């Protein structure tokens, strides 16, 4: 590398301009890896975008000699190789003997010597890893590390800008869809607010179960949209829930599939589709549409099943009366292990015991002793009657 920074500053200026002019992020990363390889005289350079929430590699951009072993690593291998807890910079003196490199019998591992890499924060739980590799032993000087870090950070800035914009745009789109669903629900006075309450219950229960922030938000959105499939049903059927004929019930039972088809093309709601489709499955396999059972049912859908039933019991409908809180508790307990996931029911009960007002307005007098009393009333009962929640 030349003794001055002229090439580095030229590349840095180009990348900065590209970032601020809104150029394609992939093209910016391609420009970075190509010029880092040229500046450092490396055989190859790779920039990974890592999604730690989903434990996967979201994107990989590379340039130069196709080092197959490094280019094909999975998430766990990559974070073990470039462990941020060991510091922001990783140096592997000889890839041919380092046990962290996958030992695949290809030309790749036999043809690479040293590897150097750095970590970069992007946004949320996404980070970037930038690595260069050489044929022989090659340790970067302090100045070369500065160049690698500076250009890597430029890439991270470009990604942060792109992801921030994308997330804002996706959030706006989600809000449009959710607002539409709630507006349609508002046509029926008896169900007005149902989805909002189900979503709120589901978020509280998901937090109680220790789920990740991303999963909690997906479950919340699933609660808002779980009944969107009822859009295509006539007002006459919706107004007579509870006194429908068998044929009419068959029509209503199509709403999870219809809802999944409605939302399916909206890729920004991919995480919500299975929750919509499966929120009427039963833990014992007797639900619909796919008769899934136990852990075959997505956890988020199991949460929605409990919260949907709980809200329906408390609110009632035109043709079946609302239930007292203690009777709703008994019904949930009675259905645990049959209709409902027992772990989800227990999480909801835990919230009720600790802070009943968080779920049910005016339920401040419900304490642990009272909850135990309600559950003890089940003693001696045989059989479990299926509950109707559509």
Image (cartoon, rainbow, N blue to C red):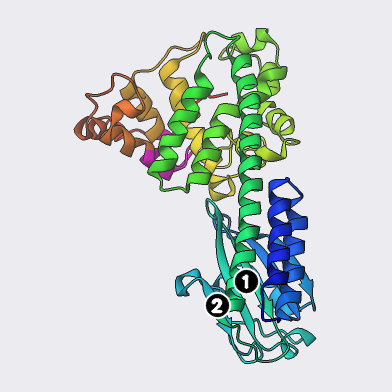
The residue carrying mark 1 is 147
* 9 relative position to 387: left or right: right
* Figure label count: 2
The residue carrying mark 2 is 90
Say whether marks 2 and 1 touch (CB < 8 Å). Answer: no
Q: Quadrant of residue 69?
A: bottom right
Crowding around mark 2 (Cα neighbors within 10 Å: few <14, some 14 to 19, many 20+) is some
Task: Inspect this view and state whether residue 147 appears.
Answer: yes
Q: Secondary structure at mark 2?
A: strand
Q: Give the residue drawn at x 28%, y 22%.
A: 363
In the depicted structure, whether residue 209 falls above or below residue 388: below
The x, y position of residue 212, in whole percent, is 47, 48
In the depicted structure, whether residue 105 falls above or below residue 223: below
Q: Quadrant of residue 128?
A: bottom right
The x, y position of residue 153, in whole percent, is 60, 61
Residue situated in front as seen by the camera: 280 or 131? 131
- State which quarter of the image contains the N terminus: bottom right
Q: If you read the primary sequence from the N terminus, does the residue marked by circle 2 or circle 1 appear first?
A: 2
Residue situated in front as seen by the camera: 152 or 312? 152
Q: Over which residues does the magenta segment extend?
A: 334-347
In the depicted structure, whether residue 367 falls above or below residue 296: above
């Amino acid at each position: 590398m030349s003794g001055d920074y002229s090439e580095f500053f030229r590349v840095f200026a180009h990348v900065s301009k590209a970032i601020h002019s809104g150029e394609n992020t992939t093209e910016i990363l391609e420009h970075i890896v190509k010029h880092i390889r040229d500046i450092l005289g490396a055989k190859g350079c790779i920039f990974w975008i890592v999604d730690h929430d989903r434990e996967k590699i979201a994107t990989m951009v590379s340039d130069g000699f196709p080092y197959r072993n490094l280019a094909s690593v999975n998430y766990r291998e990559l974070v073990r190789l470039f462990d941020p807890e060991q510091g922001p910079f990783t140096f592997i003196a000889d890839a041919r003997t380092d046990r962290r490199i996958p030992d695949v019998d290809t030309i790749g591992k036999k043809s690479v010597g040293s590897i150097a890499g750095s970590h970069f924060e992007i946004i949320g739980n996404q980070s970037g890893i930038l690595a260069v590799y050489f044929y022989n032993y090659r340790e970067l000087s302090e100045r070369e590390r500065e160049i690698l870090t500076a250009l890597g950070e430029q890439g991270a800035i470009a990604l942060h800008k792109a992801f921030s914009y994308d997330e804002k745009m996706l959030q706006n789109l989600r809000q449009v869809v959710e607002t539409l669903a709630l507006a349609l629900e508002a046509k029926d006075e008896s169900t007005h607010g149902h989805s909002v309450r189900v979503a709120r219950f589901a978020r509280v229960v998901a937090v109680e179960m220790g789920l990740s922030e991303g999963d909690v938000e997906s479950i919340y959105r699933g609660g808002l949209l779980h009944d969107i499939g009822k859009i295509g049903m006539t007002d006459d059927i919706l107004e007579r829930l509870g006194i429908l004929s068998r044929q009419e019930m068959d029509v209503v039972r199509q709403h999870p599939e219809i809802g999944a088809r409605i939302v399916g093309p909206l890729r920004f709601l991919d995480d919500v589709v299975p929750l919509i489709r499966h929120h009427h499955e039963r833990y014992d396999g007797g639900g619909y549409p796919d008769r899934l059972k136990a852990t075959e049912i997505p956890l988020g859908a199991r949460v929605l099943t409990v919260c949907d039933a709980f809200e329906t019991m408390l609110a009632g409908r035109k043709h079946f009366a609302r239930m007292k809180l203690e009777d709703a508790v008994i019904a949930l307990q009675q259905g645990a292990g049959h209709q409902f996931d027992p772990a989800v029911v227990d999480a909801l009960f835990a919230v009720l015991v600790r802070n009943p007002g968080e779920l049910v307005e005016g339920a401040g007098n419900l304490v642990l002793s009272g909850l135990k009393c309600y559950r003890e009333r089940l003693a001696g009962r045989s059989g479990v009657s299926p509950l109707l929640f559509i």
